[in-house]
Amino acid sequence: MTEIRYSAAAIPTSPAVWLDRRGDAAVIIIDNPPVNASSAAVRQGLMAALRQVGAEASCVVVAGAGRTFIVGSDIKEFGKALPPPELPEVLAAIEACPVPVIAAIHGAALGGGYELALACDWRIAAPGATVGLPEVGLGMIPGAGGTQRLPRLVGLPRGIEIIASSRRVPASEALELGMIDALAGEDLVGDAIAFLAGRGKRLAARLTPPPAGPDEIEAAAAAALARGRGRECVKEAIAAVRLIETTPVEEALRLERAAFQRLRVGEEATALRYNFFAERAAAKPPVADAPRSIGSAGVVGAGTMGAGIAAVLLAAGLPVTLVDSDAAALDRARQAIGSTLADLERLGKLAGSSAAERLSGLDSGPEVERLGGADLVIEAVFEDMEIKTGVISRLGDVLKDGAILATNTSYLDIEALAAASGRPENFLGLHFFAPVPRMKLLEIVQCEATAAPVLATAFALAKRIGKLPVLARPGEGFIGNRIYARYRAQCEYALDDGALPQEIDAAATGLGFAMGLFAVSDISGLDIAWRLRRSKAASRDPRERYVTLPDAVCELGRLGRKTNAGWYDYDDKGGPRPSDVVTGLVRANAARHGRPAPDARTIADAILGAIVNEAALIVEEGIARSAEDIDVVLTNGYGFSKSRGGPLFQAALMENRRVEAMVELAANRAGWGFRRGDVAALLAPLRDRD
Ligand code: NAI
């Protein structure tokens, strides 16, 4: 792996930049660990170094110290006024440098880092490097010339695609496209200097872009807008690139900067930054203990979840033993795992290995004894206390000493399962979400006796299999399902009072959910919850507000998409479409109660009030660590839009009086049994952020 060091003769030009020499070349090295973010000290140091590079230097190489070039701007600076000099000023100084300047890229050159490379005359990269402009992914656009310089190198259609998708481009593709000019060998800086032999200045901002027809540009813009679902930053990015067709470059750079400045303090960028930090905090292990090494894993229960879990473990290169008492289930699981691995291979997510190779790591059979050598076993059998207790206590006997045993239970008493395992210090919950290969979220449930190294291992495993972990403590439904139950209840109360499924779903999507509750329920199927409700009917408290409409819909045989009828109608051509049958049921039910149907605002307020209130209780009870963690759960496991930050982020934007009023509304609609949490205390840390 390329690693850049500077010589003993190097001199600092700021705490984060060094000026070195190699022959008669000047080498400017950015040293701002961990990722050489282009923060104020870097920008100041670059200006000073460029001033010091005298006419005696034949050329200038800009490189990053350590293992990477510049992995972007300093995200912590984004929400505030930027200390001078701002990046465009530094880039102008690079362009004005009298001798040729080359960016020598290893690791990654992203965002402001790649914009800096674009302002250099040439770019050379080590083979494993990646380059890109990920600003749109953070709700912004490149603000230091990226929209003007990149398309002049790669053409407007490709420029639009790269900027709007915010994708990272590997060095080999970057070379093909013209994003870099050469690939280096072992000696990146030496090769950079050699590359400049016979080459002079070549400012990207002065180039005429490779030709592209208006149709091609329109098509690229339309594709980007469709992928970006009309987000403002995507529109702005396209508009900025298209300035190249109409506007002199100096003016276009000014307009680009203005759009960047506007977007970076806007709601979407603020929300996405909040997500970025919240996810990073959530994924940080809560203990400093070293994780145990996991060389092999086991999964018991080869149903929907077990097959998905086995697939992601195999994809990460772990050999997996899958156990199920039902041979047909094992066959189906093998098929499902094979096709998941094939999908991942197509998406380039198997790190060079093939689906067939990964699948060869799968062993399966009916006997739990096969798991005696596994370092970690995840139980995913039926959600039934008796069955799970039996399987877990048997596993407790079979597993080797020190092996970790985890359950994927959603609702059962996890402390009782820990006790049944006979190894409570090596026991915890790993609550995956369906479909496992797609859903990033993993709730890691720490039981009373879970040992610190076991917890550390779970966090390390999450990282290894590409999941985003959030720490939870035992409690019915942990974090996500507990909040979802309150959300569901409010949707049902609205239905009970005469609002139609499509109206309630619209209120939920207006809040930020990707789909409404009823549309989602139709996809999952309505029968499982129906069965659960019937099994709990006898123990239900009669004071609880119980909405009968979901049962009435099921009684008509409307079980969701699989029967082409649920809360909505479906047919071969698709759906969901509002259903006259359901409308009739809802209207008749409301007429019996005689309550007025709530309007869209009331529905949305009650939903958000219920979510915020339950979140407050969950944090008070110590089941989740923070409001941020809860937003991470809802954005990564329940389809809440990251561009909106999360429901708690949204609530924190409002005055507390308004949030309290929403909770009051939710409480009134729920009636008996509604417990109040301290929402002001929950949201205070979010409101205090800078
Ligand atoms: P499933 O019904 O699809 O699969 C369960 C499998 O366990 C079946 O193949 C069955 O043959 C096997 N099994 C049952 N008893 C067994 C025993 N004694 N020994 C070996 N195998 C046995 O269930 P699903 O949906 O995969 O759920 C599994 C667990 O994951 C449950 O605890 C559930 O609550 C939890 N979960 C489910 C989610 C979902 O969306 N389906 C989401 C998160 C957790």
Image (cartoon, rainbow, N blue to C red):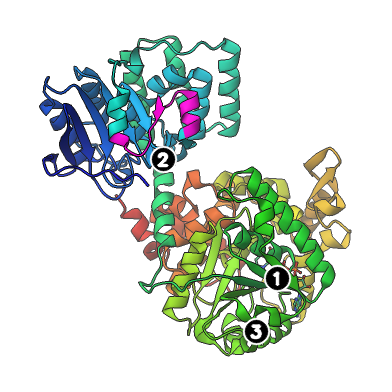
Q: Position of residue 423 (x, y in %)?
A: 55, 87
The magenta segment: 172-189
Is residue 436 found inside the magenta-colored segment of the image? no
Residue 410 appearing in the image: no
**Residue 217 found in image quarter:** top right
Q: Nearer the viewer, mark 3 or mark 2?
A: 3
Mark 3 or 2, nearer chain start: 2
> On the rendered structure, is 552 left or right of 306?
right
Give neighbour class at mark 2: few <14, some 14-19, many 20+ (Cα, 10 Å).
many
> On the rendered structure, is 519 left or right of 420?
right
Three-letter code, disc 3? Leu
The residues tagged by marks 2 and 1 sit, at their Cα atoms, a distance apart of 43 Å
- Report the disc number at residue 395: 3
- 607 or 311: which is nearer to us? 311
- Report the disc number at residue 322: 1
The residues tagged by marks 3 and 1 sit, at their Cα atoms, a distance apart of 13 Å
Q: Is residue 269 above or below residue 48?
A: below
Is ligand 1 less than 8 Å from the beta carbon at label 1?
no
- Report the disc number at residue 269: 2
Q: Position of residue 498 (x, y in %)?
A: 72, 53
The total of numbered circles placed on residues is 3
The residues tagged by marks 3 and 2 sit, at their Cα atoms, a distance apart of 47 Å
Q: Position of residue 470 (x, y in %)?
A: 48, 64
- Report the disc number at residue 14: none
Mark 2 or 1, nearer chain start: 2
Give neighbour class at mark 3: few <14, some 14-19, many 20+ (Cα, 10 Å).
many
Three-letter code, disc 1? Leu
Give neighbour class at mark 1: few <14, some 14-19, many 20+ (Cα, 10 Å).
many
Q: Position of residue 31 (x, y in %)?
A: 23, 44
Q: Residue at x 15, y 31 (%)?
A: 49
Mark 3 or 1, nearer chain start: 1
